[in-house]
Amino acid sequence: MTAINVPTDNSKIAHNDDEKTYSSACTKVWRASDIPSLTPIIMNLTGSGNDELHYAVVGIRKMLSVERNPPVLEVIEAQILPKLVQLLQHPDAGIVFDASWALTNIASTEHTRCVVECGAIPSLVKLMMHENKDVREQCAWCLGNIAGDATDMRDMILAAGGMQPMLTNIQNPATNSLLSNVVWALSNLCRGKPQPPLEHLQSAIPALGHLVSTKNEVAMMDACWALSYLSDGDDTRIQAVLESGVTPVLVELLGHKNASVITPALRTLGNFVSGNVAQTQTVIDADVFSKCLDLLSHSKKNIRKETCWLLSNIAAGSRDQIYKLMTKPKIMHQVIEHVRSAEWEVRKEATWVVSNVATGGGTDHIHSLVTLGAIDALSVALDYSDTKMILVILDSFESILKVGRDSHRDYVGLLDESDGIEKIENLQHHENERVYERAVEIIEEFFGVTDEVEDENLVPKTDGGMFTFGVASEKFTEGFMVDGTPSGFDFSSGFDM
């Protein structure tokens, strides 16, 4: 089981997760003809007048704001970077704003570390409390790029006290644009491996929990991503986020029209159900199943995959939690269809759902899987080239066939009708020793003869040291759901979803 922003003129997406997008307050892209030459800029940087200094800083900012191939290295080699960092302490807010913008441009390239090595972090953190909202926003932007570039630089920002001024700006945002950029920067303080210690981030959880209900969609999305980073780990981290009471809101967000909001909300809930039984139950109690059927048919492959991942973690829970899942036949029917024919990433997670029910569920749960077509779907999935998934499927078949034998149901016949027996026989030639051993174990246990009178269709024969056999086919018609509902049900007839 898979237990997972800057303006156009200085853009760097400091995030690797699917569906992540960023917005921008500053979108002007300068043409090369607008940009002054570097020589007079350097001269004016050493001048004493504010007008000349401001002209120089604006010129650098414009130079670094070209859409293609900004001369970042040339600016660094001209020793301008230390001067820009020094100007972060200038009394003129306009000069500070343009200097921080220029530094943001540099931090959005592969030269981010140069900004840090020049000592910019302490001043940028301090400026997050500047009286000018545009300065605060630009500094948040720069810090977000730095935090997203490398975990050691992220930790430098946290060590410099970068969390608290960001929370202050979130609690009292001057503009929606400022809020969006600060939440994005904060999300980058929460992400990355190795993770920062929870105690450095715990103060942000209440604010992030509040933000998942905000009308600012960009801030909402980034708050969800931040919570997903914070809850990615052991039960302690999961519990810290759960205690914010955010679960019901995240479940509601699964019905959001924007896939970029659904994805991080779904990831966070998936983290929750990867925890202990009580943590998993919190998500079930928030009625997550009511959203799953739509998510399983979502146009975005990643959302279908993550939904199966969430369900697989629920199926790995207690027997009662498996029962809750198996009372949703439409959901399980869709999962089994994904095992049969979805894209590889989706099929893999869907297979884990079925396997966890088959190996961890009770007799009734397994009968329900068979009624829903699990044997045929798993037989199709035996064509996987992934060794681990083949072993998972063989474990599932072993559990299903044991229940069939003990219940006197011809699950072997169903397996034969779906070509599963032939595929298991062929696995005796598999290059992986464990696959070969498991195939032989299943053949010996379920396809041999136990009665004194041998049936020629059931007697295994050897061919070159491998078992071959035939199995008498008998159409299987009996089965029931966990609540005793007879097989042959109509999925459109009002079953609880």
Image (cartoon, grey):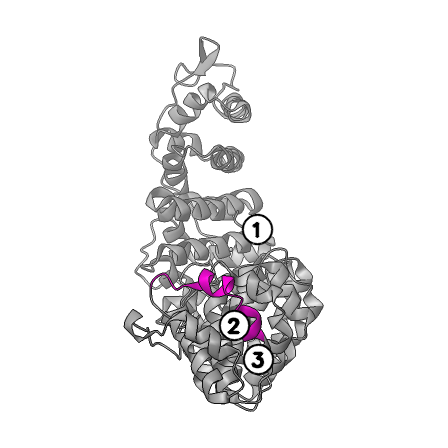
Task: Report the front residue among 388 and 201.
Answer: 201
- Residue type of the residue flagged with mark 2: Cys
At x 33% / y 49%, what residue is drawn? 488
Name which of mark 2 and mark 1 comes first in the sequence: 2
Task: Report the front residue among 341 and 193.
Answer: 193
How many other residues sit within 10 Å of disc 1, few (<14), some (14-19) or many (≥20)? many
Quadrant of the snapshot with the C terminus = bottom left
Residue 50 in the image, given as x and y percentages of width and height: 50, 88
Question: What is the distance, in whole Å, between disc 2 and disc 1 at their CAs?
Answer: 42 Å
Q: Within the magenta stretch, is there residue 176? A: no
In the rendered image of this protein, does residue 376 appear above or below residue 109?
above
Residue 106 in the image, given as x and y percentages of width and height: 48, 66
- Residue type of the residue flagged with mark 3: Leu
Q: Residue under circle 2?
A: 142
Of circles 2 and 1, the one toward us is: 2
| Residues shaded magenta | 68-85
- Answer yes or no: is residue 143 visible: yes
Q: Residue under circle 3?
A: 88
How many other residues sit within 10 Å of disc 2, few (<14), some (14-19) or many (≥20)? many
Name which of mark 3 and mark 1 comes first in the sequence: 3
Q: Residue under circle 1?
A: 316
Q: Is residue 174 left or right of residue 192?
A: left
- Answer yes or no: is residue 460 visible: no
